[in-house]
Amino acid sequence: MNEQDDKLDDLVAAHKAETHEAPVHLKQQWHAAIDQAAALERGRAPAPRERWHPGSFFWGMAVSAAIAVSVAIGVFVSDDAIDNTPVPYLVENPAPSDAIPVAYTRGLQQHFRSSRQQLADLDGNEDAAMLVLRLVEQNRLFEAAADKNNAPQLARVLRAFEPILLRLAATDIAPEDAEALRAQLSFELNVMLTKLAKESSDETHST
Amino acid sequence: MKTLAKTILITLALIFAAPGLAQSDDRDSNDELKLAAIEALITAPADKALPLVSKVLAGNHSTEVKEAALFILSQIDKPEAQTTLLKFATEESGELQLEAIRMIGIRGGDGMSNLKSIYDSGDSDAREAVLEAFMIAGDKNSVFEIAKTAEGDDFEEAVEMLAVMGARDELRQLRSARGTSEALIEACAISGDLECLRELAADDSDIDLQVDAIEGMGIIGGDEVNAALVEIYKSASNEDIREAALDGLMISGDDKGLLELYRSSNDSSEKKELLEYLVMTGSDEVWSIIDSALDGDE
């Protein structure tokens, strides 16, 4: 079992590297490894875990591979079960001002709404860990896009979501801890949704 | 007028949601109402929202409610908001302190300059939270400065955070300054620095580190790495290196390399080991190999 754990750790480490533009063969390889790691993870004995560990970023890495192609084409289309709406998030010719492109803001609002709904659907779901990883995937997409769309503050918020999501993806998390993390994330998503809606409304009224 | 009415409603909700179950971790209906009120504060003008948030933070409310208030503070672009966050990050303990540190990272800007002193004076949780705040803010340099002098677990955590942030140059500088270690090898792999790993994989002065580097190459993967791992396996001078190369190939998911080694081997115990690795990689070819092995063809 220890050897298997070591192998899992290796697989886990295999997906830590944070790169948003990876070669295609790596992306395919990471996809396969997500399944392997998840399968092994399910068979692993639980261990105490209190806070997020940076090593958990392997999940982010793994899923970032999945989004890399989408980054390249500028449109993210998620799995049917998650969200069918193509979300534009990169603007090839952003406005010359420092303003955040409207298309990005709309896409981000959709991401926040979708994330909130998926968090609500997590409770008792057998595939919760994989669903959370999909959320990480989407989150990374919008984080990368935020940096490219004059939105460093939004990028920071999105980066701050990820450690919480990764803690939530842990298979050994206690139900009450998971509930607390979901509640925290839902609150923060709601706040950001409200803030974005208000800013959009203010801009509309001022023009 | 609409904003004023909303602010009044929020105020009333915060006042009349009785704080009777203060500091309880259980989410009750009072907390639900308070959280809804706090959430609505994001729409209020900063000068209206700030005193209400401050009141919540000073009051007898649950940790969850106060954490929510801290998040609102992170979104208020006023120096007073930053001052309050710093106060909580330096004077509080436990979850509220950690959350305040996270909020400083989310907020970014001038408040970040205070994180180093919080790191220096804080416990291990606080130090970890500070590193996370630097990650949130995208501040590689501050993590690098910490890693330059940190020891033990603190060093490893800082190195891992640099790896997560893709700080290859900083990690190379650390390796030059502090020597190679398991943490730095892992960081090379996490940050995708193949050149670093190839150097270390060829260095046989410390077999454990050499093994780590070879395995780490599998983390990066790709055709170049896979070919190199097959060569390392073939030319390995001892079993540890050979096994590390196989681990690397498995981590990389390179069933072609493993198949090549399996087919070129004439040693049954070696074939058995290679077959185990092929099974672990989930190779499509493995079933025909098993079939052949059972038939005695291979």
Image: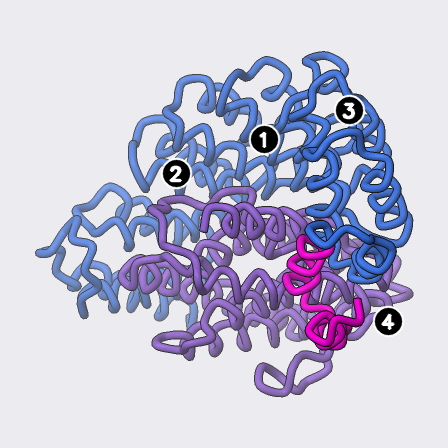
Chain colours: A purple, B blue
Return the chain for callout 1: B
**Label whose residue precedes the other's in the sequence (3 or 2):** 2
- Residue topped by disc 4: A73
Asked where in the image residue A99 lies, by quadrant, the reply is: bottom right
Is residue A159 found left or right of A98 in the rendered image? Answer: left
| The N terminus of chain B: image quadrant | bottom left
| Chain on which label 3 sits | B
Most foreground residue, B262 or B82 = B262
Which residue is more in the foreground, A170 or A120? A170
Are marks 2 and 1 in one subunit? yes
**Label 3's element?**
helix
The one nearer the camera, B288 or B253, is B288
Look at discs 3 and 1 and give the one toward the viewer. Answer: 3
Q: Is residue A133 left or right of residue B268?
A: left
Residue type, numbered disc 2: Leu
Label 2 or label 1, whichever lies nearer to me, is 2
Q: Can residue A76 be seen in this view?
A: no
Question: What kind of residue is marked 4?
Answer: Ile
Q: How far is mark 4 from mark 2, CA to CA?
A: 38 Å
Say which quadrant the C terminus of chain B sits in: bottom right
Q: Name the residue under label 1.
A: B110
Q: Is B111 placed above or below B62 here?
A: above
Check residue B276 for magenta coloring.
yes
Asked whether residue B280 is drawn in magenta, I would say yes
Mostly what secondary structure, the magenta segment? Answer: helix
* Magenta-colored span: B271-298
Instruction: Give x and y (percent) for residue A89.
Output: 75, 69
